[in-house]
Image (spheres, grey):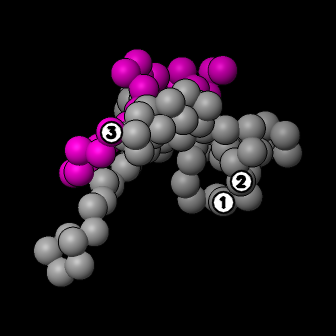
Amino acid sequence: YEHFGLKYSIIAPHNVISVNQSFNDPYRNVCAIFIRKCILGENLSIYGDGKQTRAFSSAEFLFDPIQKLFDSYDGGLFNIGADKSNSILEIAQL
């Protein structure tokens, strides 16, 4: 902004899940990893006690907040995500 005068906002969505996400990445997105392992009949890997929590956000519910940011520029960093969290154990049980 200081150099070119271009306005910007940084949007950081967290733990997004979607039916169209990649299920082939073995290192991130625990929901996709668990789904892939279930399809393949493999055991789920849970590190630690599984009580770690994440707030998972369905992609479809992020469109409206992102559109509002485009329509009313404020600048800055915006963390977007769900307000309800689940433990890794709860996700594994699902």
Residue 53 shown left or right of residue 37 in the figure: left
Q: Position of residue 78 (x, y in %)?
A: 29, 43
Compute the Cα span from label 2 to label 3: 32 Å
Q: CA distance from mark 2 to mark 1?
A: 7 Å
Whichever of labels 1 and 3 marks the residue nearer the N terminus, that label is: 1
Residue 89 in view here: yes
User: Do the residues bearing badges 2 and 1 touch, measured as CB atoms within 8 Å?
Assistant: yes
Q: Quadrant of residue 40?
A: top right
What amino acid is labelled 2 in the image?
A: Ser
Q: Residues within 10 Å of mark 3 (few under 14, many from 20)?
A: few
Q: Which residue is mark 1?
A: 25
Which residue is identified by label 3?
A: 72
Dot 1 amino acid type: Asp
Secondary structure of the residue carrying numbered label 1: loop
Location of the C terminus (image quadrant): top right
| The image quarter in which residue 82 lies | top left
Which mark lies nearer to you, 2 or 1?
2
User: For the residues carrying marks 2 and 3, which lies nearer the camera in this image?
Assistant: 3
Q: Relative to 69, does residue 28 appear above or below in the rendering? A: below
Q: Which residues, given as a range, are shown in magenta?
A: 72-94
Q: Please, which residue is most extreme toward the bottom here?
A: 3
Q: Which mark is residue 22?
A: 2
Q: Is residue 57 visible?
A: no
